[in-house]
Structure formats: C-alpha cells, structure tokens
Amino acid sequence: MSQAIDPERFKHYINGVFGALGGAMTSAMIYLGDRLGLYHALAGAGPLNSAELAERTQLSERWVREWLHQQGAAGVLEHRGDGRFELSPEGVAVLADEKHPANGVGFFSQLPQMLALAEKLPASFQTGLGLPYDALGPEGARGIERGLAPWFRALLVPLALPRVPGVVEKLKSGIQAADVGCGAGIALLEMAKAFPASSFHGYDISQHALERAEENRKAAGVTNASFHDASSDPLPADGRFGFILSIDCLHDMTDPAGVMKSVRRALADDGTWFVADIKAHASYEENVARNPMAAMMYGTSVLTCMSSALSEPGGLGLGTLGLHPGLAEEMARAAGFSHFEAIDLGHPVNAFYVIRP
C-alpha cells in the first residue's frame, strides 16, 4: 500500500525539486551571459532595456529581452521598471570583474561540458570507474582556470603566502618551488612573477591544463617557471624543493596518499607544503548542516571530483567533500610529515593547511 501524501510536505517537495530545475536554467543563462559579453556590457552602465543592451552587444533584441526577463526573475539582475534592468555592484564583482577575488563566473563557462558528462556516467555507476578531468575537453580546463584565477591573482601572493611562516623570505632569496596539481598554472605564474630569484615547477596530469599553462607562461613572459607532465616527468625524490603548493586538487586524485609520499620525498627537510582543499567535515550530517552549498558540492563530486578520483582502478574516490581536516592530517603524518597546522584565511570554500616534515 502506498502511504498517504501530506499536502504541505508535498507542496514543499515539489517546490524544492522544480526549484533545482530552475537553478539549472539560471545557470545556463549565466553561462550565456558570460559567453556573449552581456554582463560586461551591463557593468557600470546603469539600467538598460533590451534594445539598448542589444545595441551594445550587437545581438538580437528579442533574444536579449527574454534573457533579461529570466535574469530579473531569478534575481541575478535588478529590475528598475519600464523594461530596464541593472547589474548591481555585487553582481559586477561576481559576474563581470575578473580581477575581483570573489568573481566566479568562470565556473559557469564549463557548464555545457560538465552536464554533457551525465550522458557518460551511467556506465561509471555500473563499472565503478570514473572519468578524468580531460573528459571535459579544453573548455573544461579553461573553465577551472577562470574559476580559480581571480583568487590566485588577487590574494595568493599578498595575503596567503605571508601567513605561511618563513616562506616569503625564502622565495625572495631564491629557492626551488613546485605546484603539485598546478592546472593552468596561474598560481605558479603569480609566484614566479613576484619572486624572480626562485625557480618554479608545475606538475599536473591533465594535458589540456598543461597546454593552457604553457600558453599562459608565454603570454606572461615568465622565464623562471616550467611545467611537467607528472605521468611521465614526476616529482623528483631528492628533496630539492623548499616550498610546495597544492590547491584544490588532493580530493580529486586517485591516489592522494601516494602523492603525499611523493611530496615528502621532493620536499627539503626544512621545507613547507601549503595545501588548500575544500572545507569538509567528517560526516554527511555535518556537511549538510554546516555547508549551505553541500547539495551543489555533492553533485559536482559525481560529475567531476569523485569521478576523477575513481578514474583509475583502485582510486580512493574521496570526492569534493571527502578530505576533512582529520583525514588530511592522518594521511600527511602517514606520509612522513610531523607538523600539520590549519590556518584561517577567511575563504568561504577552502580550508588551508601548513604541513612540514
């Protein structure tokens, strides 16, 4: 027998399910607004109607009008009456100004590629094997780069590194440093520009990301940085690095414990490993109660993070919310590190750790 449906709970449940679908539609419109330059055209322009915005962007007025209506209804734009909409200063920071550390529009640029993976994931549910990040294609690597780059450019060198005792002084004097999981290389290149006496080495296994990294290096004119395919040119085991950085990547790895051991062998005995990873808690209940983005993060995990972490047989499969501080410290100590310290940089998504031999 079927259970009786409570009318109020039923209404709430329907609103939640279709609210999620509405969020997907809004995400798709943000992707289009970014790709078509609509947010840049709105930034600082005051209230515009569809004809004015279409003229600024050389787009069809009817399509722009419907996009404006959706963005206004979703609260992304503010409706000023008489068919005019405005991008608030907060909206400019998040959606238009890629120099602002809170800018996150880049994460939407990989949306089509990410959602396309849903067509392939039924096989993963059956076999247990996931897909590597390169399954997202070149646009996936570019999207991750754009999503993370604003924070790297605005805050890594002036805010984060000075909080890691002794590192800035060493980088100024000249040491070898590495970024393990460097992606498109933005963090590494920011450090290389800031500390010309040091040499910097980026390691990753994503071919698309490494191609982007080399393009970014050439565009920046940086000569004290190089990038390495960790699959064929892994971290050296000779303790040459005085500083190693790893940002938002350990939870994505098939063998994070093995990588931690490789980092320990590559790091000098007086060196420092600076790690950033997603803020997570030890249980599902804590993650849901304390993280308002938990549903989004668990979904992202299925589409990308956990999938990547299970892309090889025997992969650990931590997933987006899988590397909580207790586990991170346990794994670091098992890899041969004796010092593990969490530092608070006020980041809404990431936790930061200073790890030493």
Image: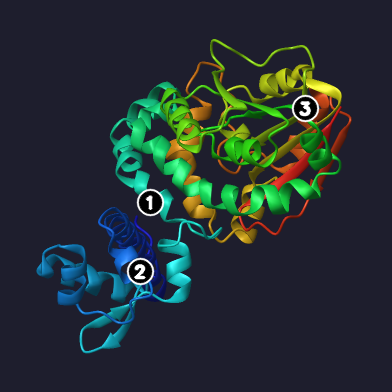
**Crowd class of label 1 (few under 14; some 14 to 19; many from 20; radius 10 Å):** many
Q: How is the image coloured?
A: rainbow
Say which label, 3 or 2, has the lower sequence index.
Answer: 2
User: Nearer the observer, disc 3 or disc 1?
Assistant: 3
Quadrant in the picture for the N terminus: bottom left
Query: Nearest the camera: 31 or 98?
Result: 98
Secondary structure type for disc 2: helix
Q: Nearer the viewer, mark 2 or mark 1?
A: 1
The structure residue drawn at horizontal position 37% and vertical position 28%, both measured from the top left corner, is 135
Return the residue at label 1.
108
Please, what secondary structure does the residue beneath circle 1 have? Answer: helix
Q: Mark 2 or mark 1: name the one nearer the start of the chain.
A: 2
In this rendering, position of residue 45 left or right of residue 298 = left
In percent of width and height, residue 325 lies at 74, 43
The residue carrying mark 3 is 175
Q: Give the x, y percent position of residue 90.
A: 48, 72
Q: CA distance from mark 2 to mark 1?
A: 24 Å
- Residue at the farthest bottom position: 82
The amino acid beneath tag 1 is Phe
Label at residue 15: 2
Residue 23 in the figure: left or right of residue 168: left
Disc with the residue nearer the chain's start (3 vs 1): 1
- On screen, 316 above or below 95? above
Q: Which mark is residue 85?
A: none
